[in-house]
Image (tube, grey):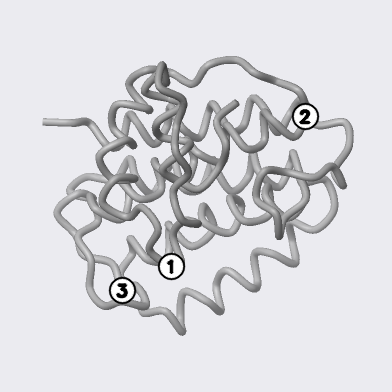
Amino acid sequence: MTDVVALLHSGSAEFGARVHRVDDWSAATPCSEWDVNALVDHLIDEHLWLPPLLAGHDLEAAGKIVESQKHSLAGDRAAAWDAAVLASGRAIGESGVLDREVALSRGPTPAAAYLGEMIVDATVHAWDLGRAIGVDEPLPAELVEFALPLAQQFAGSEPYFAPPVDPPADASPQERLIALTGRPPR
């Protein structure tokens, strides 16, 4: 069985390593609607939502918790990232977390599936952030291997990804993953 908790930690670490290398928060990213600051804020938001959702709060209650936390995390984006990931790491470390359901906009969702989606997001957005800041280090193979079938499942479906692009004939698994999300991998 796949250890989604360990993979989420790994994906968060990959993204976080890039967050701490950002020099230009206004740099463009492969996500056309987001600059680096907005991309990092997106992942901070995801990690802020995780603890209240895993604690059983509905979307309205979780939203209030997230909004109150956002005010305290204003300013230094790297510090805000670290604080959000620390809180989400505690939440996913709780006993029985994978047996829970979370309230998402699409309805009750198994926690393991929710964490899986967060792994895909962390993996793809680590690539995005790397591209934006000039870091082309390959993503860990275990993250790509986990994310690839989920990206195939969601390929081209709003609001997850843009329509897939054709990968190069000699594409690596990472490049196939990136192409599935509508981004040119090279």
Residue 51 appears in which quarter of the rendering?
A: bottom left
**Which residue type carries mark 2?**
Ile
Q: What residue does disc 2 label?
A: 133
Q: Position of residue 132 (x, y in %)?
A: 74, 34
Sort mark 3 into few (<14), some (14-19) or many (20+) by Cα contacts within 10 Å: many
Is residue 45 depicted above or below 125 in this figure? below
Q: Secondary structure at mark 2?
A: helix
Tag count: 3
Q: CA distance from mark 1 to mark 3?
A: 19 Å
Q: Toward the viewer: 6 or 126?
A: 126
Residue pictured at 67% horizontal, 36% vertical? 129
Going by the image, does 5 lie left or right of 119? Answer: left
Is residue 145 depicted above or below 58 in this figure? above
Query: Closer to the camera: disc 3 or disc 2?
Result: 2
Residue pictured at 70% horizontal, 33% vertical? 19
Q: Secondary structure at mark 1?
A: loop
Q: What residue does disc 1 label?
A: 158
Sort mark 2 into few (<14), some (14-19) or many (20+) by Cα contacts within 10 Å: some
Q: Position of residue 113 (x, y in %)?
A: 24, 53
**Which residue type carries mark 1?**
Glu
Q: Secondary structure at mark 3?
A: strand
Q: CA distance from mark 3 to mark 2?
A: 34 Å
Return the disc, 3 or 2, that comes first in the chain's sequence. Answer: 3
Query: Closer to the camera: disc 1 or disc 3?
Result: 1
Q: Toward the viewer: 119 or 13?
A: 119
Going by the image, does 68 lie left or right of 37? Answer: left
Q: What residue does disc 3 label?
A: 103
Q: Position of residue 117 (x, y in %)?
A: 35, 50
Residue 4 appears in which quarter of the rendering?
A: top left
